[in-house]
Amino acid sequence: MQNTVAQNLPHHVAIVMDGNGRWAQKRWLPRVAGHKQGVDALRRIVEASVQRGIRVLTVFAFSSENWSRPVDEVASLMDLLAVALSREVPRLADSGVRLHFPGDRSRLSPRLAQGLASAEAATQGNERLVLNVCFNYGGRWDMAQAAQRLAERGEAITEESLSAAMAMAHVPDPDLIIRTGGEQRISNFLLWQAAYAELVFSDCLWPEFDAAQLDLALAEYARRERRFGQTSAQRADAAVTADAGTRDA
Ligand code: IPE
Ligand code: IPE
Ligand code: MG
């Protein structure tokens, strides 16, 4: 199985990190304690992704709709991002991680927005793993802002021009989207980019998600047949031809 996983490793994995609040509530802790544990889980998964050779990891950290949570929870999430930036960025920079923060920064404090821009600048030469932390991100926001940019430039709206104007234009579409926490929905994550992603849902709450859980999702992905609208027979033929090509090369 390990070989199949290695052969069919997704280039780009995206994760809806859900279940922090329930993790905390199960322990009679405040919800913010779950979000703090969630940062630790993210650190583990970044490391595991680098070890496995995944090239792009995208995580959903704060959605356009999360502003409607209680004000103190929203404030804690903003603080947590600021703390995580100052604690984690130097180590991420040293380990070859390139950071991006797709999302609408106009509603963030100028200081936080500046912190995100600095973290992106400090890691822009790195190539081992692209880590996209989607913060104040929504799939609908992304499509609307892309269309708006094209309209302002007077450019035609095509699939290619829209893709190029989106907040995720710097990476290929996700191959695998994992959602933890047991819910089976997309919650306004990468709506456009998810067109042909494989979806894997895990009951594991995000603070408990670890390398072994990631491997389960990767194994599930490796078993899937992606057809992109074609038939199974066409995909098999294409695989044989590609295989012969690599052997002959
Ligand atoms: C995900 O965990 C983190 C954010 C949405 C910021 P939740 O906070 O949604 O956790 P649950 O779903 O309430 O358990
Ligand atoms: C999705 O989780 C957003 C993030 C993980 C950042 P939510 O907990 O906000 O999603 P819903 O409200 O259950 O759909
Ligand atoms: Mg949730």
Image (cartoon, rainbow, N blue to C red):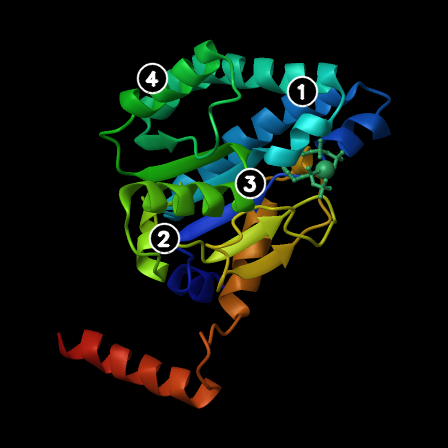
Marks 2, 1: nearer the viewer = 2
Give the percent coordinates (x, y) of residue 201.
Answer: 66, 54
Q: CA distance from mark 2 to mark 3?
A: 15 Å
Q: Earlier in the sequence, mark 4 or mark 3?
A: 4
Q: Amino acid at mark 4?
A: Ser
User: Residue tagged by mark 1?
Assistant: 74
Q: Which residue is depicted at the point 41% across and 54% down?
A: 173
- The amino acid marked with disc number 1 is Val
CA distance separating discs 4 and 2: 25 Å
Amino acid type at image mark 2:
Ser
Looking at the image, which residue is at 50% across and 47% down? 14
Label 3 CB sits under 8 Å from any ligand 2 atom: no
> Label 2 near label 4: C-beta < 8 Å?
no
The quadrant holding residue 37 is top right
Q: Examine the image and state in which quarter residue 123 appears.
A: top left
Of marks 4 and 2, the one in the foreground: 2
Residue bearing mark 3? 138
Mark 2 residue CB less than 8 A from any atom of ligand 2: no
The residue wearing badge 2 is: 163
Residue at image coords 56%, 48%: 214
**Residue 187 appears at what percent x and percent y?**
65, 46
